[in-house]
Amino acid sequence: MKELLNPQQLLNDHYSAEAEQNIERILELRAKGELEVIWSCSDARLILPDDVYQVKTISGTGPRSPWAKLLNYDRTLGVIVMDHFDCGGIQARSQLPEKIADEDTALGFVRDHVWANDPIIQSILTGSWTASRTKRTVVSVVQNHLDGSVYPQGVFNNGSQTEHKTIPTYKLMPEEYLPEGLYGDEIPQLDESFIPSSAAHILNKIAKKVEFIRTKYPEVMDLQPVQDPEVIAITTNLKPLSARFPKHFSKPNTVFQVSLARQSFDNEGELSTDDVREAFRQIHYPISYSLEHSSLAEEAPFKSTRVLYIETGDMKVSLGLAKQAQRRLWVQEWLELPDRTIIAAEAIKGKIREIEQVV
């Protein structure tokens, strides 16, 4: 087993020439008013570009209100909402028990925020819902993380008053759902004539990143069927972890990320109790699987997950979240497994100022 990730390794990676260039590129795009946002599932296997802002939540869903300022930011050029096939959150929704024993778990989050048993329908609903919170055009897509291919499903304009989507509205109703009718002989996708240039530009970036991964790390694609990242991350920072830590996170299947909204778009440390609760409900998903699968001999989801990385704009807040995590029984049990650790950090404008190993 490889060496357990430590703060110094992350710090060295973060202050490498490659990371510095990546961050500078994002800042340049923001300054020019060409900032692009991808709101996707937290799944570690998704392949996304490094020079966009990323919001990551289970199934690409969750409350939109905390992110309203980002979605309406005057330098935001376009917004992509991404779901994917074989999504654990969507699968969990189809198997929800009648009563959930503990509301502060992943099942509670799925029950409250995942609306469909199919990623295409979920992406359309999420795209429309997101568009209702912004003046920007929102495009919903579904990715096949096994090969990186992306299928546009909907374009939503004018606060979702104008929509183009692959599925008629009546077929979004649960009683109308028929997989054979939805898919036919192939995965549906929206005609490219409906896709605005801003979204087409982001989709092209995704295609280029997929090609880069295929060329530079061809062996990685063989590992995509099983989600087994080393790291779970909670972060308030919108610049991709793959850009800020390229040595450790540029490959897919290395980090399961949950984005935590700041109360103010410009205030690094201000968080709400509700948003913190939602973040912890989401990381229960990978940690519970890590506990369940840690002793298995064969490959299994989150079997190798050993690090919880917590990053906000205020070190005191990050350490406070680490303490909150340790009070949860399922985190305590996970930390009792060999080589498990929590790392806390302070990042301001994407740059690490402090970092330490908590456990």
Image (cartoon, grey):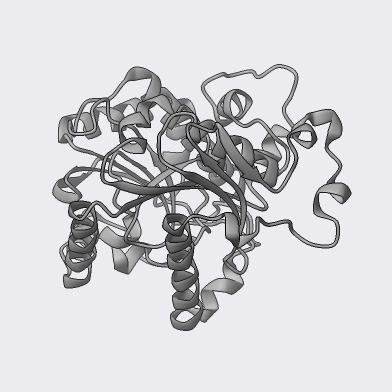
> Which residue is at the front of the view, 107 or 157?
157
* Whether residue 76 is situated above or below residue 187 in the rendered picture: above
The location of residue 317, given as percent across then percent down, is 21, 29
* Whether residue 196 is situated above or below residue 88 in the rendered picture: below
Q: Residue at x 44, y 70 (%)?
A: 209
Q: How many marks?
A: 0
Q: Residue at x 41, y 33 (%)?
A: 134
Q: Residue at x 46, y 27 (%)?
A: 63
Left or right: where does residue 317 sit relative to residue 101? left
Q: Quadrant of the C terminus?
A: top left
> Which residue is at the front of the view, 121 or 50?
121
- Residue 327 seen anywhere in this rendered image of the structure: no
- Residue 268 seen anywhere in this rendered image of the structure: yes
* Whether residue 359 is situated above or below residue 194 in the rendered picture: above
Determine the residue located farthest toward the bottom in the rendered image. 215
The image quarter containing residue 11 is bottom left
The location of residue 69, given as percent across then percent down, is 30, 31
Determine the residue located farthest toward the left in the rendered image. 353
The location of residue 217, given as percent across then percent down, is 47, 78
Left or right: where does residue 266 sit relative to residue 152? left
The location of residue 269, given as percent across then percent down, is 19, 30
Left or right: where does residue 81 sit relative to residue 299? left
Q: Quadrant of the N terminus?
A: bottom left
